[in-house]
Amino acid sequence: MTPETRVAGPTRGLAGDFGRAIAQALDKRFLGVLLMSVGASLALLFGLAGVLGWLVGFLPETITLPLIGWEIDTPFTGLQGLAVLGVMLASVFLMIPVAVVFVNLLIERIVDAVEARWYGGPARGAGRGVGDQIGAALRMLVVVLLANLVLLFVAILAGPLAPVLFIAVNGYLLGREFFETVAQRMMRARDARALRRRHRVQVWIGGVMMTVPLVVPIMNLVVPVIGVAAFTHMVHRLAERAP
């Protein structure tokens, strides 16, 4: 079966983009990148939990009151476990910036794996230097962190609308970043931006579809790689229709 035959069919839409990305998850080349991303994310989260628990361990178990000399037990030792548990719970929110960093660093391998199976090889002019990859990861990390800090304050006023704002804003940011990064492998940066703007609603919905599972533990370790693969299909599909 040729790459063109595999891509063609009734599922050529946003659902098809994600469907083909999920279908490739067990491919040997794709699975290697997936396991690398999951391992790196877990290492970062557990490392952070361990560091917090270690730092809390330096707090005293008892406090001696001045003058009278009474010793009072403190709850600091219990805070070690709470620190680890807190980081695990915080992973729901930490996973988006973590995903931004690792997926940006692995995006070339993800896209190469998708294009090798479905499109007969990497797109013309594909590839970014290591410096460009690190720069893009750091730039997007700063943007996502700042946006979510603002959302944290807005959430106080937004009340029940806070989750909707969280998903909408992060869906826009992730959709824009990953779509343009993939598209720039096939065309100039300004053409990639123009293509995204012509299909901004579809790109935003794709970003939302990637953002929602990122707040679900366990799933949020796999979704970033699947999401980039889906955006690769989206870029190819929309580029074929572009004038």
Image: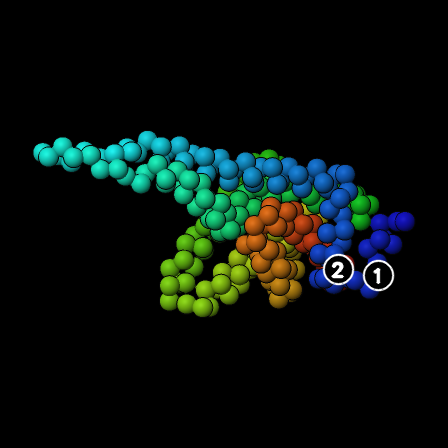
What residue appears at the point 80 percent right and 49 percent down from the top-left corner? Answer: 118
Q: Is residue 36 left or right of residue 116?
A: left
The percent coordinates of residue 29 (x first, y second) are 75, 38
Q: Give the residue at x 67% y 41%.
A: 34
User: From the viewer's perspective, is residue 115 above or below residue 235?
Assistant: above
Q: Residue 218 carries which label?
A: none
C-alpha span from label 2 to label 1: 9 Å
Where does the image place residue 4, in percent across and percent down from the top left?
Answer: 85, 53
Residues tagged 2 and 1 counted as in contact (Cβ below 8 A): yes
Residue 9, label in figure: 1
Q: Which amino acid does label 2 sit on?
A: Gly
Q: Quadrant of residue 36?
A: top right
Give residue 103's quadrant in the image. top right
In this view, the residue in front, 10 or 184, is 10
Q: Name the residue under label 2.
A: 16
Q: Is residue 25 in view from this perspective? A: yes
- Quadrant of residue 125 within the rendered picture: top right
Residue at (9, 34) in percent of width and height:
67
